[in-house]
Image (cartoon, grey):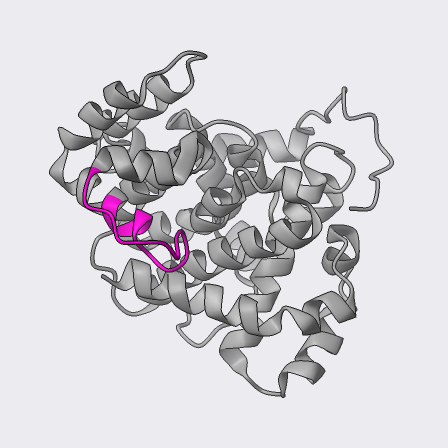
Amino acid sequence: MPAFDVDSANPLLFDEKEQRASDEASTSVAAKLAEVDGLKTFPAVARQVLSALSGQSFQFGEVASLIEGDPSLAAGVMRMANSAFFSRGKRIAAIDQALVRLGARSVREVVSAVATMDLFPDPVGAGKQIRDHCASVAALSQTLAAKVAPLRVEGLFLSGLLHDIGKLLLIESGECEYDRDERHPDRDHREETSLLGFDHALLGGYVVSRWNLPEPVPRIVTWHHSPKRAYTNGDIGPYVALLRAADHLDSALQSRADDPSVLAEKLIERDDFVLAGIDLSLLKSHWPELEQARRDVLELFSK
């Protein structure tokens, strides 16, 4: 991973323009639906599980009991633990086995992922496309990170899954409509800012932070359409570069306008790929694996 030339001990603060946009996001219809009406309150059991896992000496038995107390969460965790993306091993049939297989780090992400996707159970039209895209970016960003920056894998799957959650909220609130055929990752946020004064990234980061999901996830979500800002932060910049690389890679995989070699050559010209440490040979050599990871997660979240 290339070094980011910044004093990471002193992260940048919001400037005045960003603060105004943040204020507008926090008072938007979608944010109020999430905060006041309780429509998108993060599930209580999931919060308890994450709290238990944050302790230094948590017990798997305690966590398993909490998960088993929520049938929907338990079913989702088992489905993910047995999925092709998270495991190639023997099928398991108990929550405690799932926790051992996944490990504490992955359990946090899996529980958060299941709880989040349960908030948007049956999207249609543009909503389904956005949810599928989020699942794809989750798979691609984690797979890319495992190749070029294994120490930065934690949080990327969840960040990818949540990066466009602001769009889903804006669809539900009726504040925005999205073109089902639009595949350019950096277009919608400019139109949202012009219309609303903030974009889906800022709104999504606000909601995720209200859910008390751990850093760096809220900041990655907030800054994924602010690369110039993110890339001056040595802590967050590499994560954002990986997520943005996955974002553009998924758009390329959806379009299939060219053969993989041509697509890879076009993608690798982007600063996001350079800053993420992804070169052309790596992208080409792992292209089949990336496509398979994307298929596995799409299948997982289609159930």
- Image quadrant of residue 143? bottom right
From the viewer's perspective, is 269 left or right of 192?
A: right
User: What stretch of residues is rendered in magenta?
Assistant: 78-94
Please tell me whether residue 80 belongs to the stretch shown in magenta: yes
Return the residue nearer the eye: 129 or 260: 260
- Residue 7 in sight in this render: yes
Most extreme residue toward the right, as rendered? 5
- Image quadrant of residue 129? bottom left
Give coordinates of residue 10: x percent, y percent.
76, 20
- Residue 198 in sight in this render: no
Please tell me whether residue 138 belongs to the stretch shown in magenta: no
Give coordinates of residue 158: x percent, y percent.
45, 43
Query: Looking at the figure, which quarter contains the C terminus?
Result: bottom left
From the viewer's perspective, is 237 left or right of 171?
A: right
Q: Residue at x 73, y 66 (%)?
A: 282
Q: Residue at x 45, y 41 (%)?
A: 204
From the viewer's perspective, is 220 left or right of 61?
A: right
Give coordinates of residue 235: x percent, y percent.
70, 32
Give coordinates of residue 77: x percent, y percent.
27, 43
The kind of secondary structure the magenta stretch mainly shows is loop
Q: Residue at x 31, y 42 (%)?
A: 116
**Tag count:** 0
**Measured along the vertical axis of the image, is residue 219 above or below residue 117?**
above
Most extreme residue toward the bottom, as rendered? 258
